[in-house]
Amino acid sequence: MSEKGQDEQIGMGAKIGFFIMAAVGCAFYYLIFLNWVLMVPIQNLPYPYK
Amino acid sequence: MFSVNNKKKKIGALILLSMIGMLLLLPFAQMDVSAQGKEEAAAEESAEPAEGEIGSKGKDKQYGGVNEFGIVSGPPAPEMVYPDSYGSYGDYQSRTLLWVSNQQHLYFGSFVLAVPMFVFVMELIGATQKDRKVGKKFDDLAHEMMKISLTAYSVTAILGGILIFTFLALYPGFFGYLASIFKPVMHIYALLFILESGVLYVYYYGWDAMNDGNGNWKWTHLGISCILNAIGIVLMVMANTWIGFMMSPAGVDESGRFLGDIWKVIHTPLMVPIVIHRILGNAAFGGGVVGAYAAFRFLSSKTLEEKAHYDWMSYIAMFMGILNLIPLPFAGYWLMREIYAYRQQMGITLMGGLLAWVFIMQATMIATLFITVNYYLFQAMGRMPGAERYYPAFKFLLAILVISTISWLTPHTLVMTPAELKAMGGQQHPVVGNYGVMSAKNTAINTMITTTVLTFCLYQRANRIITVPWAWKGNCFLILLFAMAWVNILFLGIYGYFIPANVRIGLSVPQVVSTLTTLFVGVAVNTKMLKGSKEVAPIRWGQMSVRGAYALFLLAVAFTWTMAVMGYLRSSVRLHWHVNEIMRDNSPWAFTNPLGYAGNINSMNVLLFWTMLLFVFWLSSLAAKKAPSKVTADAGEAVPAASH
């Protein structure tokens, strides 16, 4: 099935819904998971050879 | 393959090989005997040795806790006196001579270490391919790569000999001390070198004899490749421990007396990051050199078939090089972090003081590398029908790369006249100066790597039409994955200006992970999307533009020059020490060479290396040539080959 055919089958609502979900997912991953969850243990890591 | 009649010969050969192996182990037995003798002698002496004498307790310079003390097992580092402890050729800088021989040996050593790694991967791909035609293509490629490496191997050994003689002639005092410290492992190094030569020759010359497609012999051959690579890596690790010891000595006391535990001498604070950084660097460099070889053969090929082969080879080599180039800045960052942790002053000398400008040079080179890689991929898409739809994106990708480059190579401070300084209101420019700090630079390099990953994703789908039912969702996800990664990288870069330095250093981790996410997740999703995709038309291998081939030369030369300049940096950071804080350099050449001089020597090193390498390339192409046959109609009998 061509890409165009796929596009026709997906409704605008579903497209926007998926976009929002993916955007929230990516934002959560980068901004919350990486920046916050990863940062906390890194700040408290004992430094080698000190 | 091997005939049954040869069975006896085979057994005889194996017995002979085992005997040679046993002979190689003799020095170890000798070592044990001497160690026993020492222990006995020490036991006989009832009196407690005085402090600092052999057998007394010594405090380790680096290790703490349970590893703090060791038994003094060697004399202190000798004090170097000029001219007694040094040799020279007239007034010429001995250091420069050593520098050149070291650099040349390192170039060839890196190359012959990296190529077998690629060859292993290529051969493995070849052996595991279901389509035997494609499998053979990879196998031939691996064989050809190995051929270049074999010639370079002899050059490496010769340069290694020259390096040792240079050390002995010009720095006998220093070399003697280093040899006394590393005595327990120096012979292992030499013996491993012999072993590597043996395995290498069996591996190369046994290629055709063991080539049964993907049968047992092929897998045995791959096993030999594994052994070859393992020996190569151990050799490199051992050589790296010497420079690790020179930069951050351990396992010795304050005056350089060996404390009896060779592992502590090997495992210095900087050893692990140096080793990782060098393995990745060597692999990236090896990819660059093989890519240049393929580009050279591509440009000089006469037939389209040959051109197609070398076009394909250059792409594979470039790809392998880039695969190692991408994690390289992170390994470098880790090394710098460990240097700061070891001696803060050393870190400051490197990044904020005497040698800070070298990092600007390095930034220029690495930016060149990434722009060149993107340029090559843009050019390569020219031979992929269907890539036209991505052409409009190139200018934007290039714009991101150029902006990042400009930001990355903006210096923190400038060398200025007092009048200029006054006009600017300080050493730091009020606007441009903001781009001279690590926050901006980390952001720049991460943006560049992310952009390169995106270009690669476009390259992957250039001549394909995606047919998976979830194509729309996949595209939407990929756009967001990249866009949000850029947002996060930029956000962390800006946020870094508002927080203290110790917290800012931590920000680099989520920045790097953002970049790596696009690399691993982005490429994985893209590849998954391409499964079962339709081809617009096959790639027109061999029709790569000449500019694309030249880009590969630029890539390889940029790798070489970066290695030279960063080698100068790493070595110079010891300042006036042969062995940091233990053995002072008292020769007239203990000063740090100015950048201009270093630039000239580095450029000369690069030129020398490439001249020698061109010779190696030429030799490899010579092996494939045959003299025109002069056999006449009456020459029916077999004629022996002419002697030479």
Image (cartoon, coloured by chain):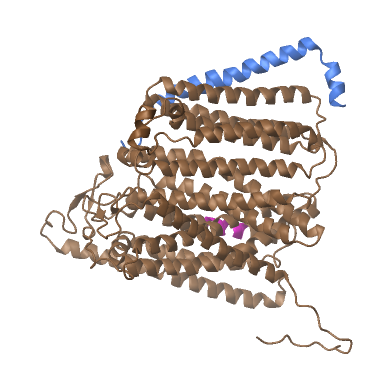
Chain colours: A blue, B brown
In magenta stretch: residue B226: yes
Residue A37 is at least partly visible in this image: no
Q: Quadrant of residue B301?
A: bottom right
Compared across the picture, whether B67 is left or right of A39 comes to: left
Position of residue B250 measured from the top left corner of the image (x, y, whole percent): 30, 49
Q: Residue at x 82, y 37 (%)?
A: B386
Camera-nearest residue between B28 and B305: B305
Give the side of residue B570 with respect to residue B549, left or right.
Answer: left
Q: Where is residue B430 in the image (x, y as percent from the top left)?
A: 42, 25
Residue B347 falls left or right of residue B516? left
Q: What stretch is highlighted in magenta?
A: B223-231
Q: In this view, does B397 lie above or below B496?
A: below
Q: In this view, does B575 lie above or below B149?
A: above
Q: Residue furthest right?
A: B633
Whether residue B77 appears in magenta in the rendering, the answer is no
**What secondary structure prevails in the magenta region?**
helix
Residue B488 position, x and y percent, is 55, 23
Give the answer, above or below, for where B608 lies relative to B268. Answer: below
